[in-house]
């Protein structure tokens, strides 16, 4: 019998754990249960039990100190932590002491705790059979290194990999192999929920769950491929038919999805390859799955993508229609709106396949174009544009990207609706500039239009708009130039002429003064499109 020591200051938890489990079923017996770490350490020194189950927060000596001292006394000691869901920050620190597992107080069922104890019993059995037997942790590291070195490197030949996989008892047959990638849809939120900044505890927990599920089916191995991505490799013997293999993989995938949703409240997406023959096929399958991961951007979270099963991706008609209607209903009559609507319609109705990077880059352009509609407001536009550009760059799905853009337009709309009320004279001048900015305009001409003196108009405009007339006109022309740079392939000198600048050289200097970059650099930065052939230098040289 393996001896068990329980250290837990909550009597009900301690008694419940001691009496709710049939310890003999796991070849174990509880030799003592105590309420603090100091008393537990004294018993541990005297009895050296094979398993220590301890709480973290206890009086006199807490669980962290007890674990550290127990590990010093016995490097092979099996240690399980008693914890609450909200206490994962301290559990994470305990992992440095090679803790084997954890039990959730008042959360885990007797069956779940039995699963943990069964794994501990198996480890103890192996330790006692041979001093050279490796622990599960060591075996998992060896499996993980072997798989990654084979998939990504050239260290092992097929024969060497086959021999090492067999030596590690990997549940794989080279006759029919299926590589599958699993992506945690919001890994960042999962880590935040468990207060696990580096994700170490979350990864361990997820791998434990994946291993348990695959063990139940008797096939496959699971590996942590990246922070939010996991690699599942299934191997079947030569007697398995392709349809049978496909059905089995789909069943396991849905079982994993259900378990992870139940225990972690997360959704996951899968990329599933086709059955192929031989270990070398895993490298090709892995690359194909990585390339296919982008489909999740179009299909959304919680989706299954099958390699070879989808045509090139396009923006769904419903999302495109919703976005166009959103802009059409936007409460502004500004020219920026018309340019934005025209540009969006061209992009959203194209018949060509698109990828996530192009879509995000295009939305980034739309963010700036929409911002050009906001003038004479107190909005801090550079910060707003930068904030939403970052949000869109981090969008995981097309729907999330569209929703972020909708929120952005609503924010811009709020600024537009809260504009300072202008006098009739200043409002008329602004409308006049809208209609005539392409030609030379003087303050005297504008004053005559609204029937006031130039001096009075100058003073009134500065008071209400917060900017003098000449600076406003220059900024307006630059804004119109930005729209043409982003929405057309017109050459720089053509845009200078269309926006009322006397020549390209003056336009380029004025543009750089207000934006910090020349027109050509600005277009390249925001659109990533190649400039029209033969376009002269922005600086006029």
Image: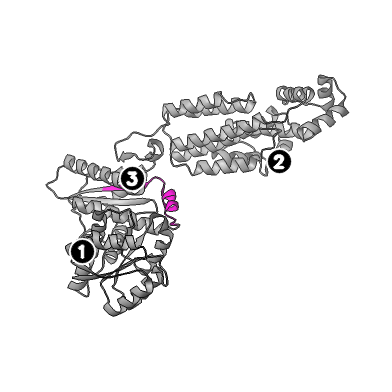
Q: Mark 3 points at which residue?
A: 261
Residue 220 visible within the image: no
Q: Mark 2 points at which residue?
A: 514
Dividing the image into 4 quarters, which one contains the N terminus? bottom left
Q: Nearer the viewer, residue 537 or 71?
A: 71
Specify whether residue 90 is painted magenta: no
Dividing the image into 4 quarters, which one contains the C terminus? top right
Is the residue 284 above or below the residue 56 in the image?
Answer: above
* Cα distance between the residues tagged 2 and 3: 51 Å
Specify whether residue 192 is painted magenta: yes
Q: Nearer the viewer, residue 128 or 346?
A: 128
Element under disc 3: helix
Q: Which of 418 and 287 is in front in this view?
A: 418
Between disc 1 and disc 3, whose residue precedes? 1
Q: Mark 1 points at which residue?
A: 23
Element under disc 1: helix
Viewed as shown, does residue 504 lie left or right of 521?
right
Magenta span: 179-196
């Amino acid at each position: 019998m393996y001896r068990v020591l329980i250290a837990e200051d909550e009597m009900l938890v301690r008694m419940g754990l001691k009496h709710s489990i049939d310890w003999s079923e796991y070849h174990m017996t509880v030799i003592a249960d105590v309420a603090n770490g100091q008393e537990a350490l004294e018993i541990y020194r005297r009895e050296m039990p094979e398993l220590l189950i301890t709480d973290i927060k206890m009086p006199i000596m807490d669980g962290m100190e007890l674990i550290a001292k127990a590990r010093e006394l016995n490097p092979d000691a099996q240690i399980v932590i008693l914890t609450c869901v909200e206490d994962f920050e301290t559990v994470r620190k305990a992992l440095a002491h090679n803790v084997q597992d954890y039990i959730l107080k008042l959360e885990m069922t007797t069956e779940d705790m039995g699963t943990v104890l069964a794994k501990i019993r198996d480890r103890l059995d192996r330790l006692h059979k041979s001093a050279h037997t490796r622990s599960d942790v060591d075996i998992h590291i060896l499996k993980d290194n072997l798989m990654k070195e084979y998939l990504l490197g050239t260290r092992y030949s097929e024969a060497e990999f086959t021999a090492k996989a067999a030596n590690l008892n990997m549940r794989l047959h080279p006759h029919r192999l299926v590589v599958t990638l699993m992506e945690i849809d919001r890994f960042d939120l999962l880590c935040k929920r468990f207060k696990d900044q580096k994700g170490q505890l979350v990864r361990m927990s997820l791998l434990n769950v994946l291993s348990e599920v695959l063990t139940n089916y008797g096939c496959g191995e699971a590996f942590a491929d990246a922070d939010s991505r996991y690699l599942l490799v299934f191997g079947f013997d030569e007697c398995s038919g392709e349809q049978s293999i496909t059905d089995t993989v789909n069943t396991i995938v849905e079982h994993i999805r259900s378990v992870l949703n139940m225990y972690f409240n997360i959704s996951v997406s899968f990329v599933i390859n086709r059955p192929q023959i031989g270990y070398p096929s895993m490298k090709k399958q892995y690359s194909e799955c990585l390339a296919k991961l982008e489909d999740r951007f179009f299909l959304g979270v919680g989706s299954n993508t099958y390699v070879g099963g989808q045509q090139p991706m396009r923006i769904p008609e419903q999302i495109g229609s919703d976005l166009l209607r959103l802009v059409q209903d936007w409460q502004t009559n500004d020219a920026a709106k018309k340019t934005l609507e025209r540009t969006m319609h061209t992009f959203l109705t194209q018949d060509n396949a698109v990828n996530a990077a192009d879509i995000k880059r295009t939305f980034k352009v739309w963010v700036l174009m929409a911002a050009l509609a906001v003038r004479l407001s107190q909005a801090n536009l550079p910060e707003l544009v930068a904030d939403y550009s970052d949000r869109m760059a981090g969008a995981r799905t097309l729907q999330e990207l569209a929703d972020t853009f909708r929120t952005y337009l609503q924010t811009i709309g709020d600024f537009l609706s809260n504009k300072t009320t202008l006098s009739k004279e200043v409002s008329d001048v602004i409308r006049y500039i809208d209609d005539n900015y392409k030609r030379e305009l003087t303050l005297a001409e504008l004053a005559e239009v609204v029937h006031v003196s130039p001096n009075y108009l100058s003073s009134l405009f500065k008071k209400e708009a917060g900017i003098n007339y000449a600076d406003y006109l220059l900024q307006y022309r630059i804004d119109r130039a930005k729209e043409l740079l982003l929405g057309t392939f017109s050459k720089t000198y053509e845009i200078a002429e269309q926006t009322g600048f006397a020549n390209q050289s003056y336009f380029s200097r004025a543009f750089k003064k207000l934006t910090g970059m020349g027109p050509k650099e600005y277009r390249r930065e925001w659109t990533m499109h190649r400039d029209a052939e033969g376009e002269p230098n922005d600086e006029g040289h």
